[in-house]
Amino acid sequence: MLKFYSKYILILLAITVVSCAKRGTITGGAKDTLAPILLNSSPKNGTVNFKGNEIKLYFDEYVKLKNVGKQLIVSPPMSKPPEVLPYNASKYITIKLKDTLLPNTTYSFNFGQSIQDNNEGNILPQFKYVISTGTYIDSLELKATFKDALEKKATNFVSFMLYEVNEKYNDSTIYKETPRYITNSLDSLKAVKLENIKEGKYRLIALKDANNNNKFDPAKDQIGFIKDYVSIPNDTVFQLELFKEVAKFKALKPSQASGNRATIGYEGNPKDVKFEIKKGEESIPFKISQLPKKDSLQIWFKPMKNDSINIAVSKDKFNETFKLKLKDQKKDSLNFKPEKAGNLPFREKFTINSSIPLEKFDTSKIKLINKDSAVVAFTTSYDEMKQQLVFDFEKQPLEKYTMTILPGGMTDFYEKTNDTLNFKFSTLDVSEYGNLRVKLENVKRFPIIVELTDKDGKVLASDYSEKNTTLDFNLLEPNKFTLRVIYDDNKDKIWNPGSYLEQRQSEEVIYFPSEIDVRANWDVEQAVDVGK
C-alpha cells in the first residue's frame, strides 16, 4: 500500500512541475508602430535671427535616415547642399550648413519620408524644421496640384518652384537661377504646399528636374507653368500640367554602324531635315531611315574603300558638317520579316520590314492567294523612314492567306534582290472582335483626335473628326481601353506640347474617367462628355 501511495505522489508532482513549466511563454511584446518623436532641437524649431552653421535634432529613440539626399527639400535651395549626419542609427541628427544663408530669409528643411525608427522602420512623415535669419518666420503658403499634359498617369518627384518677380527677374531666369522657394511631390504626393513664403509676386513653375539642379533644361526636363504671375497671399489651388518641350533640332556626331551604314543621333523633330554626303567634292548617293525606338537616323551609303566622308546636316537654323572616317566593317545583308505573324487583325495591314531600304518593288512578282488558291487583289505603299512595305486588301473572316514574292520582287538600295519569299497569315472570325461607338457630348471646338489606348498608354486605335460627334471603332481586339480626346487646335493631326518662352500651354486633352471594356462579340456604345 505504501508503495502504491508513493508512486501516486510522484505522478502528482510530475504533473505539477509540467503545468508550472507551461504556465507562461515569453514573447517580444506588442509590435512598435509609433513614429519617432522629436524631443528637442538646437536651436529650437522656429528660431529667428539664426546665425549658426549647425543644427541638432534629438529624438526619443534611435533613428536612421533613408534616401535623405532625395527626400530632404531645403527651401530656399542652397547652392551647397547641407550635410546630414550620422550615416548610421543614432538618437540625434546633425545638419551641417555649407552655404552662406541669405539675410532676412525663412528657411525650411522638409525631411519627407527619410526619418525612420531603427527597429521597425516607422516613418516620421513630412517632418519640417524652420529657422529664420530675420526677426520673424514667414508664414504664407501656396497650394498646387499637377498632372501630365498628355498621359493619364503623372510622374513623381516633381519640383514646385516660386521665382520672385523683382527688378532682376526676366524670361530666362528659370534657365539660369535657382528659385526663391521650392518643394517636391516626392514619390507619392498628388498635391503640395509651398510654405513659409513671404508676401509678394512670383512666377510658379513645376519641373521634373532630370539634373536635380533646380533649373530648367528644355532638352531633359518636363515643365508646367501658370501663365500669369501669382500674388501671395492667395487661396487658389493651382493646377500645373507637365509637358516636354519639342527641342530645337540638333544633329549629334555620327558614328559608323557597318560597312555601308552610319547612325546619327538628334534632338528635336527630324522631319524635313536635309542631308548631303560627299567624298571630297564627289556627292555620294544615300538613303535616310529611322533607327527603331531610338532618337537616331540611319544613313545608308554605297560601300567604298576606307576613306572619310563629309555629312552635311541642315534644318531651320541648324547647319553643320561632320567628318566621318570609315573603317573596314561587315556590311548589312538584305532580309525581310513580317511586322506581325500568325493572325492578322482586321484593323491592321500586312506589313513587311526590310533590313535595308528598298529602291523599287515589282508587284507582278508578288501574289496573294486565299485558302482556295484564289488570287486576292492588293495595293502597296512604302514607308521609307520605317523601311516598311505595306499591303492593303479586303480581308475576309476565317480566311488563310499566302503571299509569295518571287526573286526580283523587291530590290534594295544596293541593287540586291530577294530570294523566293513565302508568308502565311490568317484572320479570325468577326465574332472574336468587339465594336465601340463613341458619342461625344459638349464638344467645345473642332477638329479633335479620339484615341483608344491600353493601360500603358500605347495607342491602339484613333480617329480624327472635323465635325462628327459619333465615331465608330469596329473590329477591335478585346481589351479594356482608355479613351482620350485631343483638341487639335493647330490642325496638324497630332498632339502638340506647349512652350514656356511662348507662354503657350499644350493642346488640351480630356480623358474618359473609367476604362471601357470591349469584349469579343460585343457592341458597346459610350457617351463621353468632353466639355469639362
Image (cartoon, helix red, strand yellow):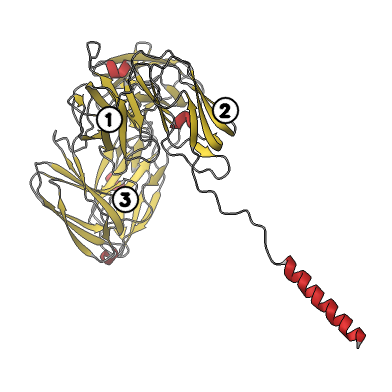
Task: Check residue 56 in the rendering and tell me which mark sits there, or answer none.
Answer: none
Task: Check residue 86 in the rendering and tell me which mark sits there, or answer none.
Answer: 2
Mark 2: which amino acid?
Pro
Task: Check residue 141 in the rendering and tell me which mark sits there, or answer none.
Answer: 1
Q: Quadrant of the C terminus?
A: top left
Task: Check residue 454 in the rendering and tell me which mark sits there, or answer none.
Answer: 3
In this view of the protein, which residue sits in the foreground, 324 or 231?
Answer: 231
- Mark 1 and mark 2 in contact? Answer it, CB < 8 Å: no
**Residue 95: image location, x then y, percent:** 50, 23
Q: Identify which residue is drawn at 36% across, 50% down.
A: 340
Q: Quadrant of residue 288?
A: top left
Disc 3 crowd, CA 10 A, few/some/many (<14, 14-19, 20+)? some
**Residue 500: image location, x then y, percent:** 23, 24
Q: Secondary structure at mark 2?
A: loop
> Quick check: can you spot residue 313?
no
Q: Identify which residue is drawn at 31% across, 29% down.
A: 195
Mark 1: which amino acid?
Glu
Mark 3: which amino acid?
Asp
* Marked residue nearer the N-terminal end (1 or 2): 2
* Marked residue nearer the N-terminal end (3 or 2): 2
**Is 218 positioned to the left or the right of 260 in the image?**
left
User: How far is the residue under mark 1 from the one under mark 2?
Assistant: 32 Å
Disc 1 crowd, CA 10 A, few/some/many (<14, 14-19, 20+)? some
**Is 470 positioned to the left or the right of 334 in the image?**
left
